[in-house]
Amino acid sequence: MNKSQTNIIVIEDDERFRGSAVLFLIGMHYETVKFCLTMAEGIAFLTSHLDEKNIIILDYQLSQGEMGNEVLHVIRKDISKLVPVIFWTANTIQEIAEIISDKTYAVVSKTESSETLLSIIKQAENELNHTIEGALEEWLVLEKGISVDPYLIKVSKQELTIKEILNELRLQTPTGQKFEKNLLMLTIDLLLRRKEKLND
Amino acid sequence: MIKFIIAYDDNEKEDLSIFFKTCAQELIARLNLEIHEFIEWNHTNKYLNEIYIDIFLNNIPYTPFVFLSYSHGSEDSLVGENLPYLSVRSNLDAFKNSLFYTFSCSSGKLLGQKLLEKGCTSFIGYKNDIFFAAPYLAEFVECSNSGIYSLLNGENVAVALRIMLDTHNKKIDELYQDNFFVASVIRDNRDSLIHYGNKDAKIDDFAFGQ
C-alpha cells in the first residue's frame, strides 16, 4: 500500500501512546507520524514542515499545565488557519466543544476505535486536498523556489513575496481571503466566457 | 495639438516604480511629439508633489488636456512618496473638459466622482485595490495602456474601455493554465475598472490651439 505523504503530527504528553495500536494503524497509512510530547515540539515540527501537508492530532490536557486549546490558539494565530486540527481527548466531547474557540476539524474521544480516528484523519486529508485555499497553498509552495523578491505588489503599496502571500493565505487575513475569492471568480469567469467547461 | 500631462512615481526605492515608469515611457514613446505637447510629473523632476501641482493647477489656462497617472492611490487621492499629490482637495476645476486616466488603487471611488462634478469629461480608473505581479511586467503594462493606445488610434472612450477589457481577457486566457494565481489577479484588476462621464469622447475633443 502506498502511504500518504501528509504528515500526521500527534501532540500527546503520554509517552505510552507512542507505541499504541492507534498510532501503529495510522503509521500503516501515513509515511510520517511525528509524536511530540510538548506543545513546543509540535509547533516546531509544524513550522519547519509548513511547505508540506500536515494534520494535527492534539491531546486536550498536556503536561506542565499546557492545554490543547492553547496550542490550537498559537497555531491559528501565528502559523496557519488551514492545517486541520483534530482534538483527541479523554474528556467528554461536550466539555471540549464548549471551551475551544478556534476552528477545529473534529473532536474525537480516546474511547473511540482506532479505525474511527483514522477515518476522520482521511476525511480531513481529503478536504485538505480539495479546497481552494489548499490548492492555492500547494501551488504557491511550488512557486516559492522561484524567487524571494516581491512577487505581487498592491498598488496601494503593500509588497508581497511568495512566502508572504503564503502567510496571508495560511492566516486567512483579508488579503489571503481575497486571493481565494479571486480564484473562485476566475473559475466563474472562465466558465462564463466558455474558456473552460465543467466535467460531467 | 493635444496637451498630455503624465504623472508617474519613479521613486527607485520601490519595485513598483519600474512598472509605473515603463507604463509612462512606453506611452511617451507612442505619442507623436511633433503633434502633441506633453508634461511629465515624476519623482525625479520633483514635480510629483502637492505644492507644485497646486501652483500648476491654479495657473493653468482652462483649456482641455489629457491627464494620465501611474502611481499609488487611495479613494480620494493619487499618492507619491507617501503623500497625496492630487486629491479631492486640489483645484480640480482645472480638469474641466479634460480626460483623466489613472492606474492607481481605489481612486475611482471618490476622486473620480469629484472630477466629474468639476466638469471632467471622462474619467477612467479603478474602484478597488489593484495589484501588479512583478514577473509579468509586459502583461500588466499592456493591460494598463491598451485603452489609451486605442484613444490615440482615434477610437472613442466606449471602444477604449472595451479594448481594455479585451486586453485583460486576452492576458487571463494566455496565463491561466500556467499561472492561475496571476491570471486571477488580472481578472480582479479588470473588474475593478470604472468609468465616469462621456463615453463618446475622442482624443481630438481635447485638442487646443487649432
Image (tube, rainbow, N blue to C red):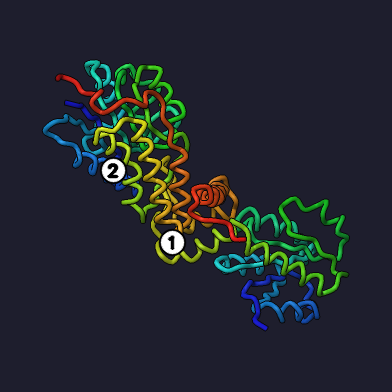
Disc 1: which residue: B178
Q: Which of A186/A154 is in front? A: A186
Assign a secondary structure to mark 1. Answer: loop
Left of B195 or right of it: where is A177? right
Badge number at residue B23: 2
Placement of A7 over or under A193, stated as above or below: below
Assign a secondary structure to mark 2. Answer: helix
Label 2 is placed on what type of residue? Cys
Placement of A194 over or under B148, stated as above or below: below
Q: Which of A175/B138 is in front? A: B138
* On-image quarter of the N terminus of chain B: top left
Residue B41: image location, x then y, percent: 25, 33
* On-image quarter of the C terminus of chain B: top left
User: Could you say which quadrant of the image residue A46 lies in?
Assistant: bottom right
Please rate how many residues cluster around mark 1, counting C-alpha atoms within 10 Å: few if below 14, some from 14 to 19, many from 20. few
Q: Earlier in the sequence, mark 2 or mark 1?
A: 2
